[in-house]
Structure formats: C-alpha cells, structure tokens
Image (cartoon, rainbow, N blue to C red):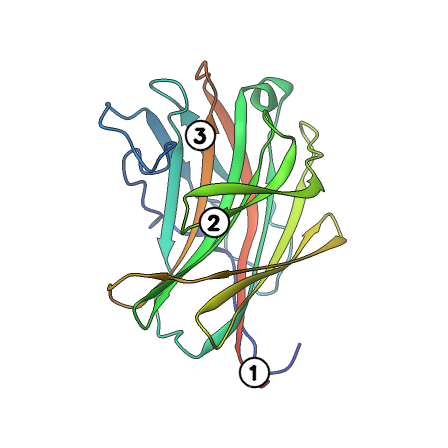
Amino acid sequence: MPNTVTTLLGFEHQSDWIQPSNTGDTGGGSARPNGTFLMTPATHEMPAVAAIPASPATFSAQGNYPYNNGYWYRVIPGAWDAMTYFAYQLQFMLPTSADLAASQAVEFELQQNIGGHIYNMAWQADIAGTKLWRTFDYNTSQWIPTDIPVSITAGEWTVVEAIFLRGESCTLTHVSLSLNGVVYPVNVTRPATPRLESDYLHCAFQLDSGSTPIPYTCKVQGVNVSMMPSGT
C-alpha cells in the first residue's frame, strides 16, 4: 500500500468496546430486558506487527428472548475526515459445533459520520438463514444478500478483509470482501444517510441469537483498520 495508509492494529486487545443494550435487535432495538452480552479482550501484549495473536478476544452472547442480539462498538479516536478508503480486517471463530448451531449470524461494521451524513459499512454472515453474506442498506434498514456463500466450520478461523470507498457525491461503495484469501468483488454503491451528528468513526461487531436463544461464544483476533485519503 502507499505510505499514506494509516493502519490501526489490535482492537481486540482494547477494553473500551461499548455494548449499548439491545441496539442490535431486529428493527433496531427492543424495549424488553436485554440478555447478557460480554466481551473479554485478548490478554497478551499487542504485537508490533500485524500477526495472528496467540490469545484472542472472546465475545459471548446469551439472548433473553428470540433474536436478542449482542452489538459492540468501539470509538476510533482521532480525526479521520480526510479518509475515503477503508479496509476492515478481522478473524473470527465459532469454537464448537454447538456455538455454530446457536449462531443466527455474525456481523461486523465500520460506521463514519462526516458532514451530516452516515456512511455505514456493514457485513453479515447469515449462518442460519440465507447462508449468504449480506450487506446492510442503512437507508432502508434491510440486509441485502450477495451471491457470496457463507462457509464457516466450527473450530476454524474465518479470515476477513472488507474494502470500502467513500465517494465524492455522498455515496459509499462496498468494493470487495476477502474470505480466507479469496477475494470476491462486490461493487455495491448506496447513498449515505443524512444525519446531523458530530463526526466520528466507529468499528463494531455483533452476534445474533436465533429463535431459541442459546448461549454461545465467538473468538476474535486480528481486528485492524486501514485507511487512506483519496488521491493517494
């Protein structure tokens, strides 16, 4: 990559992930009492280079009712308004066949608010439903399937890199999704969502409970974000 790229490593080591009640539920939230959703950071020292950590973070989900989902996000400190190219990298593993069977979906996202617009960069592995990877249309609050199949094996890492581009005309493009080294071009472009909020950049992770919420865990490592401005 050009030397203008900024890469932030090892978010799984941070303890400042926020779990805002039942924000991740279908329809954007629920008034019902939330389940128990916990994030335990990786405990070893952060690596000096982008390497596979030896001790991953653990996200655990215990839904309190059907489709009660655990959503965590982390504020990325700094001013990133000039950045238009984003790469979100992570590796996740559902450790056992019981964890895999209990998971409705695994999701991750970046979200940037800049200039009164939200640019939502979200992906979902729809494990129990369509068995396809889906992108999120923030304007309609709908998950839109791609033709990329979900292929997740219990006890094995899924290595992910998602590429996004923020366009000049208030648009956001899902450029590609890489799974275990296989790159799938996507090139889905949507308009940003008008929203008068302070500028921010967040990264997020989510575990979805199914129709019968069974507790399960997901291991996560290598959570890195790379960014660069346009014209580089």
Q: Quadrant of residue 71?
A: top left
Answer yes or no: is residue 24 visible.
yes
Is there CB contact under 8 Å for labels 3 and 1? no
Answer yes or no: is residue 56 visible.
no
Q: Quadrant of the C terminus?
A: bottom right
Is there CB contact under 8 Å for labels 1 and 2? no
Judged by depth in the image, the label closer to the viewer, 3 or 2, is 2
Q: On screen, 214 above or below 54?
A: above
**Disc 2, SS:** strand
Q: Residue at coordinates 33% horizontally, 50% vertically from top-left? A: 16
Q: What residue type is labelled 1?
A: Thr
Q: Residue at coordinates 42% horizontally, 50% vertically from top-left? A: 138
| Residue on which disc 1 sits | 4
Q: Which amino acid does label 3 sit on?
A: Ser
Q: Quadrant of residue 199?
A: bottom left
> What numbered label is drawn on residue 60?
3
Task: Estimate how packed mark 2 is, as few (under 14), some (14 to 19) or many (20 or more) residues with alpha carbons within 10 Å.
Answer: some
| Residue on which disc 2 sits | 137
**Disc 1, SS:** loop
Q: What residue type is labelled 2?
A: Asp
Q: Residue at coordinates 24% horizontally, 23% vertically from top-left? A: 32
Count how many numbered circles sit on residues in the image: 3
Q: In which quarter of the image is residue 188?
A: bottom right
**Disc 3, SS:** strand
Give the farthest residue toward the top: 212
- Nearest to N terminus: mark 3 or mark 2: 3
Please state the horizontal and vertical placement of residue 133, each as a whole percent of the image. 62, 41
Q: Is residue 217 left or right of residue 161?
A: left
Distance from disc 3 to disc 1, alpha carbons, whole Å, reads 36 Å
